[in-house]
Image (cartoon, rainbow, N blue to C red):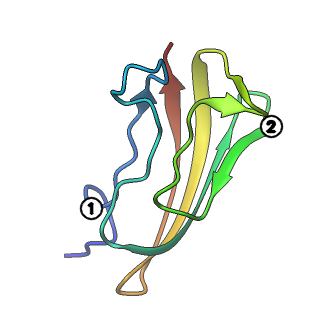
Amino acid sequence: MSFCADPYIYVPNAFTPNGDGKNDVLFVRSKMISEFNLLVYDRWGEKVFETQDINKGWDGKFKGKPCDPGVFVYYLDATCHNKLQYVKKANVTLIR
């Protein structure tokens, strides 16, 4: 069994950056990742967020302004502690 796979690497399919302290930031959740790159794009293909820091998530803003509610695409490329690769492309819905 590989721990470099779902559900050991988890990205929610929706988040609500509305300031209520619940699910306000989109994070990659995993204790198995040693390195990763997360990119988030809007529906026009513009990159709105990127991080290589697992402790840094997307707050639903682009250039300091809140993004409109909608569906965004993310690409996650990760290396797990056992050196296996995990790659995922999926949608995440921003709800306000």
Helix, strand or loop at mark 1: loop
What residue is pinned by disc 1? 8
Q: Residues within 10 Å of mark 2 (few under 14, many from 20)?
A: few
Residue at 49% x, 17% y is 95
In this rendering, the answer to whether 8 lies above or below 90 is: below
Locate residue 89, reporting x and y percent.
55, 49
The circle drawn on residue 31 is none
Locate residue 88, reporting x and y percent.
50, 55
The circle drawn on residue 46 is 2
* Residue 50 located left or right of residue 4: right
Q: Amino acid at mark 2?
A: Glu
Q: Residues within 10 Å of mark 1 (few under 14, many from 20)?
A: few
Q: Sequence-wise, which precedes: disc 1 or disc 2?
A: 1
Locate residue 83, reporting x and y percent.
43, 86
In this rendering, the answer to whether 37 lies above or below 70 is: below
Helix, strand or loop at mark 2: loop
Alpha-carbon span between mark 1 and mark 2: 29 Å
- Front residue of this view, candidates 84 and 18: 18
Residue 6 quadrant: bottom left
Contact between marks 1 and 2 (CB within 8 A): the answer is no
Of all residues shown, which one is farthest toward the left?
A: 1
Residue at 34% x, 51% y is 10
Residue at 47% x, 40% y is 26
Q: Amino acid at mark 1?
A: Tyr
Count the marks.
Answer: 2
Locate residue 48, reporting x and y percent.
73, 39
